[in-house]
């Protein structure tokens, strides 16, 4: 068992054998990314940021999805001309892979530049249920 925000989680609910994030969590991660892409197409940038933040919470346990969501945040920063996010995503992209591989990524952090890179945050209840469905 490990601590994830305010949630105590069984490792096998997030990870399967070999330390790989479970297909269920990856599926929800991809759903949030797809929502973000749809919001971006319709120029609903606020909703796109929310979907990417949710994807970040789900994807930060796995190095490649973690980097991927920061890349999409960087791209959304460019599309929405959000200088804070453009600049804020650069160090986050650099730290995403090592943060995931070492387990140092702060649990629950939204990945947005309006919060500290190393700040752990509460995880929304619906995402807690995805990360640990037995609670």
Image (cartoon, rainbow, N blue to C red):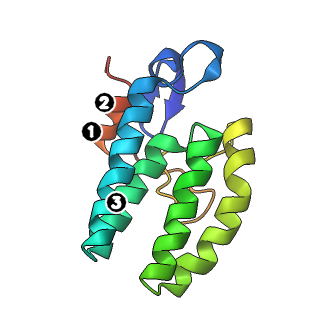
Of residue 68 and residue 115, the one placed in the foreground of this image is: 68
**Which residue is disc 3 drawn over?**
36
Mark 3 and mark 2 lie on one chain; the one further toward the N terminus is 3
> Where is residue 134, by image quadrant?
top left
For marks 1 and 3, give the CA distance.
17 Å
**Which residue is disc 1 drawn over?**
126
Find the residue positioned furthest to the front.
Answer: 41
Element on which disc 3 rests: helix
Q: Position of residue 50 (x, y in %)?
A: 33, 62
Residue at image x 63%, y 79%? Answer: 87
Mark 1 and mark 3 lie on one chain; the one further toward the N terminus is 3
Proximity of marks 2 and 1: CB atoms separated by less than 8 Å = yes
> Where is residue 127, by image quadrant?
top left
Along the horizontal axis of the image, is 95 left or right of 110?
Answer: right
Residue at image x 66%, y 41%? Answer: 100
Element on which disc 2 rests: helix
Residue 11 lies, with reference to residue 69, above or below; the image says above
Q: Position of residue 106 (x, y in %)?
A: 59, 47
Residue 7, visible in the rendered structure: no
Residue 91, visible in the rendered structure: yes
- Residue 22's disc is none
Q: Position of residue 111 (x, y in %)?
A: 52, 59
Q: Position of residue 131 (x, y in %)?
A: 40, 30
Q: How crowded is mark 2: few (under 14 residues within 10 Å), some or many (20 or more)?
A: some
Question: What is the number of callouts on the image?
Answer: 3
**Which residue is disc 2 drawn over?**
129
């Amino acid at each position: 068992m490990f601590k994830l925000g305010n949630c105590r989680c069984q490792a096998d609910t997030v990870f399967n054998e070999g330390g790989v994030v479970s297909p269920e969590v990856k599926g929800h991660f991809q759903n949030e990314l797809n929502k973000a892409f749809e919001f971006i197409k319709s120029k609903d940038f606020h909703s796109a940021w929310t979907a990417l933040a949710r994807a970040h919470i789900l994807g930060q346990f796995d190095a490649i999805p973690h980097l991927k969501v920061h890349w999409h945040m960087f791209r959304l920063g460019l599309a929405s001309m959000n200088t804070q996010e453009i600049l804020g995503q650069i160090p986050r992209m650099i730290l995403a892979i090592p943060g995931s591989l070492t387990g140092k990524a702060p649990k629950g952090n939204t990945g947005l530049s309006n919060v500290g890179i190393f700040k752990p945050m509460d995880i929304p209840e619906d995402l807690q249920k995805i990360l640990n469905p037995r609670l």
